[in-house]
Amino acid sequence: MSFEKKLYNDAVNLLKQLIRTPSFSKEEDQTAAIIKAHLESSGIAAEQSGNNIIAKNKYFDASKPTVLLNSHHDTVKPNSNYTLDPFEPIEKDGKLFGLGSNDAGGCLVSLISTFIHFYDKENLKYNIMLVASAEEEISGYNGIEAVVKELPPIAFAIVGEPTLLQMAVAERGLMVLDGMAYGKAGHAARNEGENAISKAIKDIEWFHSYQFEKVSPLLGPNKMSVTVIETENKAHNVIPVICKYVIDVRVNELYSFEEVLAEIKKHIQSEIKPRSTRLRSTSISTEHPIIKAGLNMGKTMYGSPTTSDKALMPFPALKMGPGDSARSHTADEFIYLEEIEQGIEDYTKILEYIITN
Protein backbone atom coordinates (compact mmCIF):
# COMPACT_ATOMS: atom_id res chain seq x y z
CA MET A 1 0.00 0.00 0.00
CA SER A 2 1.35 3.45 -0.93
CA PHE A 3 1.96 6.05 1.80
CA GLU A 4 -0.76 8.28 0.29
CA LYS A 5 -3.31 5.45 0.33
CA LYS A 6 -2.41 4.64 3.93
CA LEU A 7 -2.91 8.29 4.90
CA TYR A 8 -6.38 8.22 3.35
CA ASN A 9 -7.36 4.91 4.98
CA ASP A 10 -6.08 6.11 8.34
CA ALA A 11 -8.02 9.37 7.94
CA VAL A 12 -11.30 7.54 7.28
CA ASN A 13 -10.73 5.17 10.19
CA LEU A 14 -9.95 8.10 12.50
CA LEU A 15 -13.11 9.90 11.39
CA LYS A 16 -15.16 6.80 12.16
CA GLN A 17 -13.70 6.73 15.68
CA LEU A 18 -14.55 10.40 16.14
CA ILE A 19 -18.13 9.89 14.93
CA ARG A 20 -18.60 7.06 17.45
CA THR A 21 -17.48 9.35 20.27
CA PRO A 22 -19.78 12.18 21.41
CA SER A 23 -17.85 15.45 21.47
CA PHE A 24 -20.28 18.28 22.18
CA SER A 25 -18.63 21.63 22.84
CA LYS A 26 -16.88 21.65 26.23
CA GLU A 27 -17.19 17.83 26.35
CA GLU A 28 -14.44 16.92 23.87
CA ASP A 29 -12.07 15.11 26.24
CA GLN A 30 -12.64 11.67 24.66
CA THR A 31 -12.08 12.83 21.07
CA ALA A 32 -9.03 14.76 22.23
CA ALA A 33 -7.62 11.48 23.58
CA ILE A 34 -8.38 9.71 20.28
CA ILE A 35 -6.61 12.37 18.21
CA LYS A 36 -3.60 12.41 20.53
CA ALA A 37 -3.33 8.61 20.37
CA HIS A 38 -3.62 8.70 16.56
CA LEU A 39 -0.69 11.10 16.29
CA GLU A 40 1.39 9.14 18.79
CA SER A 41 0.76 5.94 16.81
CA SER A 42 2.48 7.71 13.91
CA GLY A 43 5.48 8.55 16.08
CA ILE A 44 4.42 12.15 16.67
CA ALA A 45 4.60 13.73 20.11
CA ALA A 46 1.43 15.69 20.83
CA GLU A 47 0.62 18.12 23.62
CA GLN A 48 -2.78 18.70 25.17
CA SER A 49 -4.04 22.06 26.41
CA GLY A 50 -7.55 21.77 27.75
CA ASN A 51 -9.31 19.73 25.08
CA ASN A 52 -7.05 21.09 22.33
CA ILE A 53 -4.36 18.89 20.75
CA ILE A 54 -1.15 20.56 19.52
CA ALA A 55 1.72 19.10 17.49
CA LYS A 56 4.67 20.44 15.51
CA ASN A 57 6.81 19.01 12.73
CA LYS A 58 9.87 16.92 13.59
CA TYR A 59 12.43 19.47 12.39
CA PHE A 60 10.73 22.53 13.88
CA ASP A 61 13.12 25.49 13.74
CA ALA A 62 12.23 28.61 15.71
CA SER A 63 14.13 30.75 13.20
CA LYS A 64 11.68 29.82 10.44
CA PRO A 65 8.12 31.10 9.90
CA THR A 66 5.34 28.75 10.94
CA VAL A 67 2.18 27.59 9.17
CA LEU A 68 -0.76 26.54 11.36
CA LEU A 69 -3.14 23.77 10.27
CA ASN A 70 -6.34 23.96 12.31
CA SER A 71 -9.76 22.40 12.49
CA HIS A 72 -12.11 21.52 15.33
CA HIS A 73 -13.33 18.26 16.85
CA ASP A 74 -16.38 19.47 18.76
CA THR A 75 -19.89 19.10 17.31
CA VAL A 76 -23.35 20.50 17.82
CA LYS A 77 -25.97 18.18 19.27
CA PRO A 78 -27.90 16.09 16.72
CA ASN A 79 -31.27 17.53 15.76
CA SER A 80 -34.53 15.64 16.13
CA ASN A 81 -34.87 14.90 12.41
CA TYR A 82 -32.10 12.27 12.30
CA THR A 83 -33.24 8.97 10.82
CA LEU A 84 -29.83 7.32 11.34
CA ASP A 85 -27.87 6.86 14.55
CA PRO A 86 -25.74 10.06 14.63
CA PHE A 87 -22.98 8.18 16.47
CA GLU A 88 -22.79 5.22 14.08
CA PRO A 89 -20.44 5.79 11.10
CA ILE A 90 -22.26 4.32 8.11
CA GLU A 91 -20.72 3.96 4.64
CA LYS A 92 -23.27 3.96 1.84
CA ASP A 93 -23.16 5.05 -1.81
CA GLY A 94 -19.73 6.61 -1.42
CA LYS A 95 -20.79 8.61 1.62
CA LEU A 96 -19.80 8.43 5.27
CA PHE A 97 -22.72 9.36 7.52
CA GLY A 98 -22.43 10.51 11.12
CA LEU A 99 -22.55 13.56 13.37
CA GLY A 100 -19.56 15.81 12.68
CA SER A 101 -18.57 13.95 9.51
CA ASN A 102 -18.95 17.07 7.38
CA ASP A 103 -18.52 19.78 10.04
CA ALA A 104 -15.69 19.48 10.45
CA GLY A 105 -14.48 15.89 10.81
CA GLY A 106 -13.58 15.45 7.15
CA CYS A 107 -11.50 18.62 7.24
CA LEU A 108 -9.84 17.67 10.52
CA VAL A 109 -8.72 14.19 9.47
CA SER A 110 -7.58 15.49 6.08
CA LEU A 111 -5.43 18.14 7.78
CA ILE A 112 -4.06 15.57 10.25
CA SER A 113 -3.04 13.33 7.33
CA THR A 114 -1.47 16.32 5.59
CA PHE A 115 0.47 17.15 8.75
CA ILE A 116 1.70 13.54 8.98
CA HIS A 117 2.75 13.72 5.32
CA PHE A 118 5.06 16.67 6.03
CA TYR A 119 5.98 15.76 9.62
CA ASP A 120 9.46 14.27 9.09
CA LYS A 121 10.50 16.16 5.97
CA GLU A 122 13.72 18.16 6.31
CA ASN A 123 14.71 21.53 4.86
CA LEU A 124 11.19 22.96 4.66
CA LYS A 125 10.94 26.74 4.30
CA TYR A 126 8.21 26.80 6.97
CA ASN A 127 7.52 24.95 10.17
CA ILE A 128 4.14 23.25 10.35
CA MET A 129 1.98 23.13 13.47
CA LEU A 130 -1.28 21.28 13.92
CA VAL A 131 -4.05 22.27 16.31
CA ALA A 132 -7.19 20.16 16.69
CA SER A 133 -9.28 22.64 18.63
CA ALA A 134 -12.27 22.51 20.96
CA GLU A 135 -15.32 24.73 21.46
CA GLU A 136 -15.48 26.05 17.87
CA GLU A 137 -19.23 25.53 17.61
CA ILE A 138 -19.84 27.87 20.55
CA SER A 139 -16.89 30.21 19.89
CA GLY A 140 -15.71 29.24 23.35
CA TYR A 141 -12.87 30.91 25.21
CA ASN A 142 -11.08 27.58 25.80
CA GLY A 143 -10.69 26.67 22.15
CA ILE A 144 -8.43 28.22 19.52
CA GLU A 145 -8.47 31.61 21.26
CA ALA A 146 -6.72 30.10 24.29
CA VAL A 147 -4.31 28.02 22.19
CA VAL A 148 -3.14 30.92 20.03
CA LYS A 149 -1.65 32.52 23.14
CA GLU A 150 0.54 29.43 23.64
CA LEU A 151 1.83 29.14 20.07
CA PRO A 152 4.98 30.61 18.54
CA PRO A 153 4.45 33.42 16.01
CA ILE A 154 2.28 32.18 13.13
CA ALA A 155 2.86 33.42 9.57
CA PHE A 156 -0.51 32.19 8.31
CA ALA A 157 -3.05 29.43 8.85
CA ILE A 158 -5.26 27.06 6.94
CA VAL A 159 -8.55 26.60 8.78
CA GLY A 160 -10.38 23.41 7.90
CA GLU A 161 -14.09 24.04 7.34
CA PRO A 162 -16.32 22.56 4.61
CA THR A 163 -15.98 24.86 1.58
CA LEU A 164 -16.12 22.30 -1.26
CA LEU A 165 -12.33 22.79 -1.26
CA GLN A 166 -12.65 26.32 -2.63
CA MET A 167 -10.94 29.26 -0.93
CA ALA A 168 -12.95 31.33 1.54
CA VAL A 169 -10.70 34.39 1.64
CA ALA A 170 -13.06 36.47 3.78
CA GLU A 171 -15.84 35.79 6.22
CA ARG A 172 -18.47 37.89 7.90
CA GLY A 173 -18.08 39.03 11.45
CA LEU A 174 -20.85 38.26 13.93
CA MET A 175 -22.01 40.76 16.51
CA VAL A 176 -25.01 40.00 18.73
CA LEU A 177 -26.75 43.05 20.17
CA ASP A 178 -29.28 43.37 22.98
CA GLY A 179 -31.84 46.08 22.36
CA MET A 180 -34.08 47.55 25.06
CA ALA A 181 -36.93 49.98 24.41
CA TYR A 182 -38.39 51.88 27.37
CA GLY A 183 -41.95 53.08 27.84
CA LYS A 184 -44.19 54.18 30.72
CA ALA A 185 -46.65 52.00 32.63
CA GLY A 186 -50.36 52.47 32.18
CA HIS A 187 -53.70 50.64 32.05
CA ALA A 188 -54.51 49.21 28.63
CA ALA A 189 -58.20 50.18 28.98
CA ARG A 190 -57.36 53.86 29.44
CA ASN A 191 -55.22 55.93 27.13
CA GLU A 192 -52.30 55.91 29.53
CA GLY A 193 -48.57 55.28 29.39
CA GLU A 194 -46.13 54.79 26.55
CA ASN A 195 -46.01 51.34 25.00
CA ALA A 196 -42.43 49.99 24.90
CA ILE A 197 -43.47 47.48 22.21
CA SER A 198 -44.53 50.29 19.89
CA LYS A 199 -41.18 52.00 20.37
CA ALA A 200 -39.34 48.74 19.77
CA ILE A 201 -41.31 48.06 16.58
CA LYS A 202 -40.18 51.36 15.07
CA ASP A 203 -36.56 50.47 15.75
CA ILE A 204 -37.00 46.89 14.55
CA GLU A 205 -38.41 48.17 11.27
CA TRP A 206 -35.29 50.31 10.88
CA PHE A 207 -33.05 47.27 11.46
CA HIS A 208 -34.91 45.35 8.77
CA SER A 209 -34.85 48.09 6.16
CA TYR A 210 -31.59 49.98 6.67
CA GLN A 211 -28.82 49.49 4.12
CA PHE A 212 -25.21 50.30 4.94
CA GLU A 213 -23.44 52.23 2.22
CA LYS A 214 -20.37 50.05 1.62
CA VAL A 215 -21.05 46.72 -0.08
CA SER A 216 -18.25 44.15 -0.20
CA PRO A 217 -17.55 42.42 -3.52
CA LEU A 218 -16.82 39.27 -1.51
CA LEU A 219 -19.35 39.38 1.31
CA GLY A 220 -22.06 41.70 0.05
CA PRO A 221 -23.82 44.17 2.37
CA ASN A 222 -24.00 44.12 6.14
CA LYS A 223 -27.06 42.21 7.32
CA MET A 224 -29.10 42.86 10.46
CA SER A 225 -31.88 40.54 11.67
CA VAL A 226 -34.01 40.86 14.80
CA THR A 227 -34.39 37.30 16.03
CA VAL A 228 -35.92 37.54 19.56
CA ILE A 229 -38.44 39.88 21.18
CA GLU A 230 -40.05 39.81 24.63
CA THR A 231 -41.54 41.88 27.45
CA GLU A 232 -41.67 41.21 31.15
CA ASN A 233 -45.45 41.62 31.23
CA LYS A 234 -47.56 38.88 32.76
CA ALA A 235 -50.89 40.73 32.55
CA HIS A 236 -52.75 41.50 29.32
CA ASN A 237 -54.08 44.84 30.55
CA VAL A 238 -50.80 46.56 31.46
CA ILE A 239 -48.91 48.77 29.03
CA PRO A 240 -45.37 47.29 28.91
CA VAL A 241 -42.58 49.44 30.32
CA ILE A 242 -39.70 47.48 28.77
CA CYS A 243 -39.41 45.58 25.49
CA LYS A 244 -36.25 43.57 24.93
CA TYR A 245 -35.05 42.25 21.60
CA VAL A 246 -31.95 40.64 20.07
CA ILE A 247 -30.26 41.63 16.83
CA ASP A 248 -28.00 39.30 14.83
CA VAL A 249 -25.58 41.52 12.90
CA ARG A 250 -23.36 40.11 10.13
CA VAL A 251 -20.62 42.56 9.22
CA ASN A 252 -18.51 42.62 6.06
CA GLU A 253 -14.80 43.36 6.01
CA LEU A 254 -15.35 47.04 5.07
CA TYR A 255 -16.71 48.01 8.50
CA SER A 256 -15.45 47.71 12.05
CA PHE A 257 -17.93 46.75 14.77
CA GLU A 258 -17.43 50.20 16.28
CA GLU A 259 -18.50 51.88 13.03
CA VAL A 260 -21.59 49.69 12.78
CA LEU A 261 -22.57 50.42 16.40
CA ALA A 262 -22.13 54.14 15.91
CA GLU A 263 -24.37 54.08 12.83
CA ILE A 264 -27.06 52.10 14.66
CA LYS A 265 -27.09 54.44 17.66
CA LYS A 266 -27.57 57.46 15.38
CA HIS A 267 -30.89 56.10 14.10
CA ILE A 268 -32.76 54.34 16.89
CA GLN A 269 -34.25 55.18 20.29
CA SER A 270 -33.59 51.86 22.01
CA GLU A 271 -30.65 51.23 24.28
CA ILE A 272 -28.18 48.94 22.49
CA LYS A 273 -25.48 46.83 24.12
CA PRO A 274 -23.17 44.38 22.30
CA ARG A 275 -22.82 40.96 23.93
CA SER A 276 -19.43 40.39 22.34
CA THR A 277 -17.15 41.94 19.74
CA ARG A 278 -14.76 38.96 19.43
CA LEU A 279 -15.98 37.44 16.16
CA ARG A 280 -14.85 40.14 13.77
CA SER A 281 -14.88 39.99 10.00
CA THR A 282 -11.62 38.73 8.56
CA SER A 283 -9.95 38.59 5.17
CA ILE A 284 -6.66 37.43 3.70
CA SER A 285 -5.03 39.36 0.88
CA THR A 286 -5.63 37.90 -2.55
CA GLU A 287 -1.91 38.55 -3.12
CA HIS A 288 -0.92 36.22 -0.28
CA PRO A 289 1.27 33.30 -1.47
CA ILE A 290 -1.22 30.67 -0.22
CA ILE A 291 -3.99 32.31 -2.28
CA LYS A 292 -1.78 32.50 -5.35
CA ALA A 293 -0.96 28.82 -4.85
CA GLY A 294 -4.67 27.97 -4.77
CA LEU A 295 -5.34 30.02 -7.89
CA ASN A 296 -2.54 28.14 -9.65
CA MET A 297 -4.41 24.94 -8.78
CA GLY A 298 -7.56 26.29 -10.41
CA LYS A 299 -9.40 27.09 -7.19
CA THR A 300 -11.88 29.94 -6.86
CA MET A 301 -12.13 32.61 -4.16
CA TYR A 302 -15.28 33.65 -2.32
CA GLY A 303 -16.52 35.34 0.83
CA SER A 304 -18.08 33.07 3.44
CA PRO A 305 -21.30 34.14 5.20
CA THR A 306 -20.50 31.93 8.21
CA THR A 307 -18.01 32.50 11.01
CA SER A 308 -15.33 30.10 12.19
CA ASP A 309 -12.21 29.98 14.36
CA LYS A 310 -10.61 32.11 11.65
CA ALA A 311 -12.31 35.08 13.35
CA LEU A 312 -10.22 34.50 16.48
CA MET A 313 -6.85 34.36 14.74
CA PRO A 314 -4.65 37.49 14.84
CA PHE A 315 -2.83 36.46 11.65
CA PRO A 316 -3.80 35.77 8.01
CA ALA A 317 -5.88 32.63 7.55
CA LEU A 318 -7.44 30.81 4.61
CA LYS A 319 -10.62 28.83 5.26
CA MET A 320 -10.77 25.78 3.02
CA GLY A 321 -11.76 22.16 3.31
CA PRO A 322 -13.62 19.13 1.99
CA GLY A 323 -17.36 18.89 2.50
CA ASP A 324 -20.20 21.33 1.93
CA SER A 325 -21.25 24.01 4.42
CA ALA A 326 -24.87 23.41 3.38
CA ARG A 327 -24.70 19.95 5.01
CA SER A 328 -23.48 21.28 8.36
CA HIS A 329 -25.85 20.81 11.31
CA THR A 330 -28.35 18.94 9.13
CA ALA A 331 -30.00 15.60 9.94
CA ASP A 332 -28.14 12.53 8.66
CA GLU A 333 -25.01 14.59 8.10
CA PHE A 334 -22.50 13.05 5.71
CA ILE A 335 -19.33 13.60 3.72
CA TYR A 336 -18.35 11.90 0.47
CA LEU A 337 -15.35 9.63 0.96
CA GLU A 338 -13.79 10.97 -2.22
CA GLU A 339 -13.95 14.46 -0.68
CA ILE A 340 -11.64 13.32 2.11
CA GLU A 341 -9.20 11.81 -0.40
CA GLN A 342 -9.29 15.01 -2.45
CA GLY A 343 -8.91 17.06 0.71
CA ILE A 344 -5.65 15.37 1.63
CA GLU A 345 -4.38 15.76 -1.93
CA ASP A 346 -5.33 19.45 -2.18
CA TYR A 347 -4.03 20.42 1.26
CA THR A 348 -0.74 18.71 0.47
CA LYS A 349 -0.43 20.29 -2.94
CA ILE A 350 -1.26 23.85 -1.84
CA LEU A 351 1.29 23.65 0.98
CA GLU A 352 3.96 22.25 -1.32
CA TYR A 353 3.74 25.45 -3.37
CA ILE A 354 4.71 27.40 -0.25
CA ILE A 355 6.93 25.30 1.95
CA THR A 356 9.03 23.30 -0.49
CA ASN A 357 9.54 25.71 -3.41
Image (cartoon, rainbow, N blue to C red):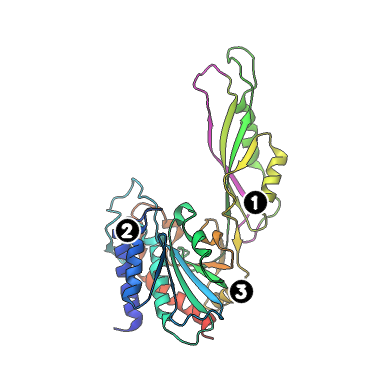
Task: Examine the image and state in which quarter residue 216 appears.
Answer: bottom right
Q: Is residue 81 magenta?
A: no
For numbered disc 2, what is the local secondary structure?
A: loop
Query: How far, Cα to Cα, is label 3 from label 2?
Result: 35 Å
* Category of crowding for the residue at label 2, using alpha-carbon neighbours closer than 10 angstroms: few (below 14), some (14–19), many (at least 20): many
Q: Tell me where the magenta segment starts and ends, as one range.
A: 216-238
| Residues tagged 1 and 2 counted as in contact (Cβ below 8 A) | no
Q: Nearer the viewer, residue 81 or 93?
A: 81
Q: Which residue in the protein does label 3 denote?
A: 288
Q: In the picture shown, does residue 143 fall above or below 186?
A: below
Instruction: Pick whichever of labels 3 and 2 is earlier in the sequence.
Output: 2
Residue 291, x across and y down, in percent: 57, 73
- The amino acid at mark 1 is Phe
Residue located 27% across and 58% down the image: 88
Please give left or right for residue 1 compared with residue 167 in the image. left
Q: Is residue 233 magenta?
A: yes
* Category of crowding for the residue at label 3, using alpha-carbon neighbours closer than 10 angstroms: few (below 14), some (14–19), many (at least 20): few
Q: In the picture shown, does residue 81 fall above or below 340?
A: above
Q: Which residue in the protein does label 2 denote?
A: 98
Please give left or right for residue 174 compared with residue 51 in the image. right
Question: Which label sits on residue 257?
Answer: 1
Residue located 35% across and 51% down the image: 331
Q: Main secondary structure of the magenta part?
A: loop
Q: In the image, which is nearer the foreground, mark 3 or mark 1?
A: 1
Residue 48, x across and y down, in percent: 40, 65
- The amino acid at mark 3 is His
Instruction: Pick whichever of labels 3 and 1 is earlier in the sequence.
Output: 1
For numbered disc 1, what is the local secondary structure?
A: helix
